[in-house]
């Protein structure tokens, strides 16, 4: 029997359409905004020393997390590095740290706040560090989608599975409706669990990870999948399509991984004979099908660590990480290149720069708590329930 909480639906406040970066604030949106206080100049030659001094002054009171996609100038001050879920768990494992400074994006800081204690404060150095994918599924849109599923007579058969790259509101919706969270590493296990609970899955918010996991890893067909478009009436789907589908994929994607194409794969194979193409499962299905290897950020790192000397690799993921790996393994004669010719940083991840980190650390060292990310108790309760279901997966 499905574990569905019978509480009332989430109280949803629509996000203002006119939200302007740097000028307004909306705590319920991934697109955070103004940075109070004066930032140090990017040209300040003492930034590195200032960051080091502030971090030393704080001592064990601060724990700095650095996502793999962060700039090198920021990563050098991270106590641990990793993907979003690993970092949130690392933060939870350090209850003695009064401040968790998360060098990542908004949904990651929310997850850290959910998993840490009330005595800890999670700080995001720049509130404008959001995530375009997470923004593609708002709480009100997902609530409307559930109404569509209900009207089609299939809601009682549907189990929501939400990617870690989603807002706390979406995680809470998932928890309330008997679903679980997944990462790119455990998506297959999450889908297998969900199909034990119900007949269909609503996968949020990345259609590509959902499709690639269902088709590539679980042997389903593309015909088993439909895409729900929140900008169209009824998601652009008929009741019959919803009844026939096994995977209802939200129309969301990663703006970085979505840029890679089959042409990118063909081009790099022509330029570098014998190259191994390794891509993230957030890439489009045709790109994943054309690649040699597919895996999460942690998988990519481990694959390159285990790769033989002299091997050649084209990596389809965020450029900061690819460049860092190329430098790391250069002395092993491993040729590591970015899959696309076009430079493709994660623009929101790159908002966490050295001036913002220095400002945050110096503020904390002076006793001023800035840019705290807090998830309200009701949302935290159900989001944590969804995360705990993931942690309980075999």
Image: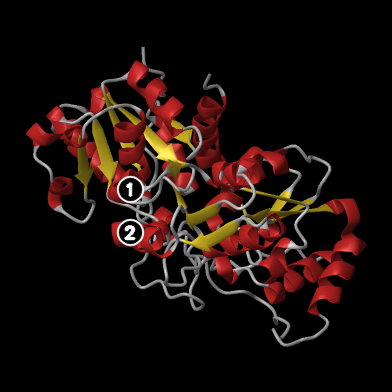
Q: Residue furthest top?
A: 1
Eyeballing the image, is 257 above or below 379?
A: below
Left or right: residue 132 versus residue 140 is right
List x then y, in percent, for residue 266.
33, 59
Q: Is residue 117 among the parts visible in the rendering?
A: no
Q: CA distance from mark 2 to mark 1?
A: 9 Å
x and y percentages locating residue 40 in the rendered image: 73, 82
Q: Residue at left 33%, top 21%?
A: 195
Read off the residue under disc 2. 266
Q: Residues within 10 Å of mark 2 (few under 14, many from 20)?
A: some
- Camera-nearest residue between 367 and 122: 122
- The 10 Å Cα crowd at callout 1, few under 14, some 14 to 19, many 20 or more, is some
Pick the front one: 341 or 61:
341
Pinpoint residue 198: horizontal percent, then vertical percent: 30, 20
Tell me the residue that label 1 is attached to: 290
Residue 121 image label: none
Choose the circle earlier in sequence order: 2 or 1: 2
Visible in this render: residue 371?
Answer: yes
Give me the residue at 65% from left, 72% from top. 353
Say whether residue 30 is left or right of residue 119.
left
């Amino acid at each position: 029997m499905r574990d569905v909480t019978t509480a009332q639906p989430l109280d949803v406040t629509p996000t203002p359409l006119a939200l302007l970066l740097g000028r307004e604030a909306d705590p319920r949106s991934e697109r955070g905004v103004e940075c109070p206080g004066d930032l140090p100049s990017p040209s300040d030659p003492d930034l590195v020393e200032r960051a080091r001094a502030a971090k030393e002054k704080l001592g064990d009171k601060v724990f700095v997390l650095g996502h793999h996609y962060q700039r090198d100038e920021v990563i050098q001050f991270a106590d641990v590095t990793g993907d979003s879920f690993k970092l949130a768990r690392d933060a939870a494992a350090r209850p003695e740290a009064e401040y968790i400074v998360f060098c990542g994006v908004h949904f990651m800081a929310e997850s850290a706040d959910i998993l840490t204690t009330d005595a800890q404060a999670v700080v995001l150095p720049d509130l404008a560090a959001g995530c375009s994918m997470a923004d593609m599924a708002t709480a009100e849109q997902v609530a409307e989608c559930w109404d569509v599923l209900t009207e089609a007579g299939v809601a009682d058969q549907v189990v929501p599975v939400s990617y870690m790259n989603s807002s706390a509101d979406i995680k809470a919706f998932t928890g309330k409706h008997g679903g679980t969270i997944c990462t790119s590493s455990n998506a297959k296990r999450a889908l297998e669990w969900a199909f034990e609970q119900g007949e269909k899955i609503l996968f949020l918010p990345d259609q590509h990870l959902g499709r690639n996991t269902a088709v590539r890893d679980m042997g389903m067909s593309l015909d088993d999948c439909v895409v729900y478009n929140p900008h169209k009436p009824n998601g652009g789907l008929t009741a019959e399509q919803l009844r026939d589908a096994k995977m209802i994929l939200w129309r969301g994607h990663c703006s970085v991984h979505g840029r890679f194409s089959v042409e990118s794969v063909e081009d790099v194979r022509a330029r570098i004979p014998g190259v191994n193409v390794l891509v993230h499962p957030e890439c489009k299905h045709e790109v994943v099908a054309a690649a040699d290897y597919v895996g999460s950020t942690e998988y990519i790192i481990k694959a390159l660590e285990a790769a033989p000397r002299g091997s050649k690799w084209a990596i389809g993921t965020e450029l900061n990480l690819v460049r860092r790996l190329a430098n790391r393994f250069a002395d092993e004669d491993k040729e590591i290149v970015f899959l696309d010719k076009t430079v493709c940083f994660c623009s929101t991840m790159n908002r966490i720069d050295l001036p913002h980190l220095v400002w945050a650390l110096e503020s904390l060292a002076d006793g001023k708590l800035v840019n705290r990310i807090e998830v309200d108790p009701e949302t935290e309760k159900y989001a944590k329930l969804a995360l705990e279901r993931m942690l309980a997966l075999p």
